[in-house]
Image (spheres, rainbow, N blue to C red):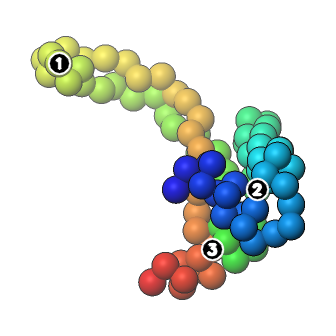
Amino acid sequence: MTKDEIVDAVVAKTDFSKKDTEATINAVLETITKTLVEDGKVAFTGFGTFSVNKRAARTGVNPQHPEQKIQIPAMNVPKFKAGKSLKDAVR
């Protein structure tokens, strides 16, 4: 499902305009992103939690030249942990 499809689904379930719905979804996504950039955590009770994992630097292999080793720098990566209600719904 794409963002446009989500917007259409929310519009179908509410009395909001498509423009207002899209602006609201964009604001939610921007807020989640900003919070994660600031090393925060976003939790939706029952749905799940967005957080940031710190991945350590490591040595990797160049897939095009397996004999060549490359250094992969440390970085932050986004993580999502599903909540109990979401896990139960998917099962």
| Label 3, residues with CA under 10 Å away: few <14, some 14-19, many ≥20 | some
* Residue 42, disc: 2
Residue 71 vertical placement versus 74 (above, below): above
Percent across and percent down for residue 16 are 86, 60
User: Between marks 2 and 3, how big is the CA–CA gap?
Assistant: 12 Å
Q: Residue at x 56, y 39 (%)?
A: 77
Residue 40 vertical placement versus 85 (above, below): above
Q: Residue at x 81, y 69 (%)?
A: 14
Report if residue 15 is visible in the image.
yes
Q: Is residue 17 left or right of residue 8?
A: right
Q: Is residue 9 left or right of residue 45?
A: left
Amino acid type of the residue tagged 3 in the rendering: Gly
Q: Is residue 91 left or right of residue 41?
A: left
Amino acid type of the residue tagged 1 in the rendering: Gln
| SS label for mark 3 | loop
| SS label for mark 1 | loop
Task: Give 19 or 1, whichever is nearer the viewer.
Answer: 19
Q: Residue at x 70, y 77 (%)?
A: 46
Percent across and percent down for residue 61 are 24, 24
Name the N-terminal-most of marks 2 and 3.
Answer: 2
